Image (tube, rainbow, N blue to C red):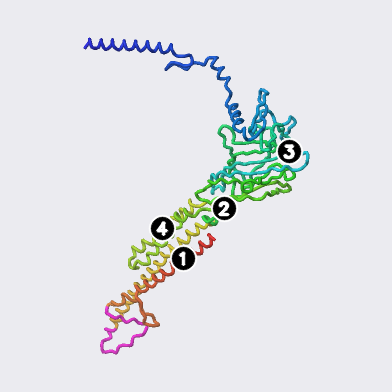
Amino acid sequence: MTLTAMLTALLWSSCLEVSRSKWEEARVALPLTQQAPGEPPAHPTPQHLTQVEDKPTRRERSLSDEDGSDQAMSGNVSLSDEGGATSGSTSRSFFARDPILPDDYIKEQRPGIASGAPIEVGVAMWLLAVQEVDEHSQMVVLETDLMMEWHEDRVLIPAEMTDPESYIVLQSSVLSTLWYPDVTVSRLRSVSTPTLITKAMQIYVKQNSTVRLIWRVTMGVGCKMNFQPYPFDHQRCHIQIESYTYQVSDLILYWLDIGQNGLYIADDIHLENFAVQFVPNNASIQIYGTESYPSVAFDLHLSRQLSSYVIQTFLPQMMFVLISWCSFFVPPEMVPGRMTLCITTVLTISTMYAAVSRTGTPASSYFKAIELFGIINVFYVFAVLLHYTNILRILSSHQQTKKITVVEHRSASLTTRSRGCCRSRKKTEPWQVRPAFPGGGRLTESWTTSRGGASTETFAAVAARLDNLAKIFFPLSYFLVQLAYWVYYTF
């Protein structure tokens, strides 16, 4: 055992020495730009840094690639490089490296103020999505690209820009020195601009000194909604873009002649509960007291989809109304079964109505169409219960009358026997009851006669007659009421 352990230890030590020697040889053979496994990264040498710095930057590579790829499109000449050299360019887009605004440019002064004519600002909007329709706060959230275009005669257009389709691309930082319209949206509640690396914004200056500003904006706009015909309602949200500072004497807004009268509508705009439609309006003037401000507007129409409400609300309530009519086919003598059916349907339809009124409808102080539908169903189910209660009242009164008649019969029999059989019997008056059998056996199934005649009707016949009338009256009246309800709210 001891000899075996010693041999094993000797073998392991020799293996470790061989591995260490090979590691040292591999480390010496590595170049300076690499590092051995397990070692910290080596710092680059000055020669390596110089080589990296000599390479063109990513922006310069993208500009050169763009200039080369668009060579067949145009024959323009680009702006001067930073080193002063110029190069041939065929791209219609330019990146401004030098200021395009004169030294005496005043941002607070609108273009064309010297001529006295108002500046015309064209507006267009890309409607990308309807993110949310908040019925409780009466607000819609839209994702849009807002575009404005105006003529700025004070910008310095390079002489190399001879193509009318060419333009200069500006950075978003130029807005700190460039005049732009201060438009706003009426009833604006929230606004945000998505930002990944920089703000989602595009600024162009065309060859004819036209400035185009495109800004992606997610805005929440208040929308006055009327929920009286809910869920048959059709909401119209009026979204108005207007100037906040400049009146019509200084600025005019109009829809650009692009898209659908200035609106670009995405094809994939879809909401689960609404059918969406956008309708642009003509330019108008908003008057606030003695001041008039220019504006453009469009309408957002929201038509509610009824499929979910029919499946979740209308059909279940109508089904329980039909179930309550099944009690007309249950014999009135089966009081526990028929009463249980009536009570169960009343409680169920009442619970459904309360659930829809509290959580399934927007909060409002007025009566809504879906609540009216629930009240109609509750009324008809409760009327079925009242119908059976009336039948039970008739049965109870019949049983009490039968008992009184039997007592009177027995008293009359005792009186007749006490007078003796030899005395002549008096003729029975029409209003008196003559039992067919001793003990009133036939009266247990008949009504007492009235003073006006001797007509009788069994309780079973009365109950059957009332149920037969209910089988006709309840479905017919319910159908007519539902027909009037649906015609009124859908047409």
Tag 3's secondary structure? Answer: loop
Using a 10 Å C-alpha cutoff, classify the residue at mark 2 as few (fewer than 14 neighbours), some (14 to 19) or many (20 or more): some
Q: Main secondary structure of the magenta part?
A: loop
Q: Which mark is residue 306?
A: none
Write down the residue under mark 2.
Answer: 235
Distance of label 2 from label 4 (alpha carbons): 34 Å
Using a 10 Å C-alpha cutoff, classify the residue at mark 4 as few (fewer than 14 neighbours), some (14 to 19) or many (20 or more): some
Which of the two discs, 4 and 3, labels the residue nearer the N terminus? 3
Residue lying at 66% horizontally and 50% vertically, measured from the top left? 282
Q: Disc 4 vs disc 3: which is toward the camera?
A: 3
Q: Disc 3 vs disc 1: which is toward the camera?
A: 3
Using a 10 Å C-alpha cutoff, classify the residue at mark 1 as few (fewer than 14 neighbours), some (14 to 19) or many (20 or more): few
Which of the two discs, 2 and 4, labels the residue nearer the N terminus? 2
172 sits to left or right of 449:
right
454 sits to left or right of 252:
left
Q: Is residue 465 above or below residue 133?
A: below
Q: Which mark is residue 347?
A: 4
Examine the image and state in which quarter residue 166 appears. Answer: top right
Q: Which mark is residue 111?
A: 3
Write down the residue under mark 1.
Answer: 479
Q: Position of residue 139 (x, y in %)?
A: 57, 47
Tag 4's secondary structure? Answer: helix
Which of the two discs, 4 and 1, labels the residue nearer the N terminus? 4
Distance of label 2 from label 1 (alpha carbons): 29 Å
Residue 446 makes an appearance in the image: yes
Contact? badges 2 and 4 (CB < 8 Å): no
